[in-house]
Image (cartoon, rainbow, N blue to C red):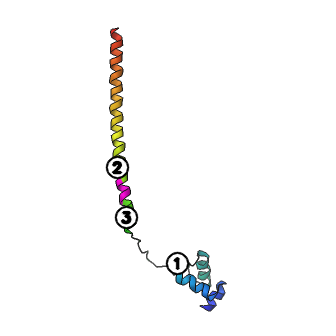
Amino acid sequence: MTWLAAEMGKTFDGLKLSLTKGSIKYNDIITLSKILDVPPAAFFQATAIPYKSQSIESLVGEQKGEYNNLKNNLKNCKEMLTALKDQIKDKDKIISLLSKED
């Protein structure tokens, strides 16, 4: 590994630390792949490991509930708007009928 670190322009300890901590940089991966003459994908797992978190699922569930609540509120507002428009039409009709009597 000493020769590899030297080829990359890094110290042995620096390369070892970045590999063990998982903090290797993108450019270092590219350099490493060129030195070893392998594609960068060779350093990664073939299949992706799905990330699962209960806190994320909980947030999504809360957002769905909030979305449904907002959707219901919008529906209620639309119904109320329709009813108010009908009332205005009725009042306009009453006003026009009353003004014809005079």
Amino acid on which the number 3 mark rests in the picture = Glu
Q: Earlier in the sequence, mark 2 or mark 3?
A: 3
Q: CA distance from mark 2 to mark 3?
A: 18 Å
Q: Are marks 2 and 3 in contact (CB under 8 Å)?
A: no
Q: Which residue is mark 3?
A: 57
Closer to us: 75 or 48: 75
Q: Earlier in the sequence, mark 2 or mark 1?
A: 1
From what the image shows, is residue 69 above or below residue 44?
above
On residue 41, the disc is 1
Is 77 within the magenta? Answer: no
Foreground: disc 1 or disc 3: 3
Q: Secondary structure at mark 2?
A: helix
Residue at the image position 36 percent from the left and 21 percent from the top: 92
From what the image shows, is residue 82 above or below residue 19?
above
**Classed neighbour count for the residue bearing mark 2: other residues with Cα under 10 Å, few (<14), some (14–19), many (≥20):** few
Residue 14 placement (x, y as % from top left)? 61, 84
Residue at the image position 60 percent from the left and 78 percent from the top: 30
Q: Secondary structure at mark 3?
A: helix
Amino acid on which the number 1 mark rests in the picture = Ala
From what the image shows, is residue 98 above or below residue 60?
above
Q: Secondary structure at mark 1?
A: helix
Amino acid on which the number 2 mark rests in the picture = Asn
Residue 80 placement (x, y as % from top left)? 33, 36
Q: CA distance from mark 2 to mark 1?
A: 45 Å
Q: What is the quadrant of residue 32 in the picture?
A: bottom right
Q: CA distance from mark 1 to mark 3?
A: 30 Å
Q: Which residue is mark 2?
A: 69
The reply, left or right, for residue 22 in relation to residue 73 is right
**Classed neighbour count for the residue bearing mark 1: other residues with Cα under 10 Å, few (<14), some (14–19), many (≥20):** few
Residue 79 placement (x, y as % from top left)? 33, 37
Q: What is the quadrant of residue 59 in the picture?
A: bottom left
Residue extent of the magenta highlight: 61-65
